[in-house]
Image (spheres, rainbow, N blue to C red):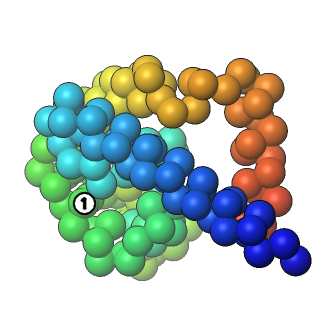
Amino acid sequence: MDFQIDRDVCKLVHQFAHRLDVHVRRVADEVGITASQVVALRELSEPITARELASRMSCEPSNATFVLDRLEQLGLIRREPHPTDRRAKQIVLTEAGRQRRADVLERLSVASPLTRLTAAQQESLRDLLKSLVGPA
């Protein structure tokens, strides 16, 4: 194993993650919500449970619940009974939430650190990262 390549890759991944974080925080400031709320809105592409959202956000379920409580107070989400699990609730975007999510997604796509890459390069990067991370 080449330790220099390992260090270089780790450093570059860390620097890229930092740039993504700065970008998300900038968008959060623009729309007046927190970075965690931006990430939650980005991940709410369909109704999911709080536990599923926490997994997508790479955080503890209690942290996701806190974020969801704030989004609910803002009128962007609602909790509904899960269609197949009586014990669970689904997180569903309200109409205002769908509009805010669309705005957030559009803003995230502008000046994203990924825009330096062509579409083909972005797909290649995605595929490489998937092979490193493994199945969800």
> Which residue is depicted at the point 24% across and 60% down?
67
In the image, taking residue 62 as reference, residue 121 lies left or right, namely: right
Q: Position of residue 76 (x, y in %)?
A: 24, 41
In the image, taking residue 67 as reference, residue 133 lies left or right, namely: right
Q: Position of residue 86 (x, y in %)?
A: 45, 75
Seen as rendered, the residue at the extreme right is 1
> Which residue is depicted at the point 38% across and 49% down?
21
Image quadrant assignment for residue 98: top left
In the image, taking residue 126 as reference, residue 13 lies left or right, namely: left
Which quadrant is home to the C terminus?
Answer: bottom right
The residue at which mark 1 appears reads as 67
> Which residue is depicted at the point 21% across and 67% down?
66
Q: Position of residue 9 (x, y in %)?
A: 68, 60
The reply to whether residue 72 is visible in this rendering is yes
Camera-side residue of 108 and 117: 117
> Which residue is depicted at the point 13% across and 44% down?
74
| Amino acid type of the residue tagged 1 in the rendering | Val
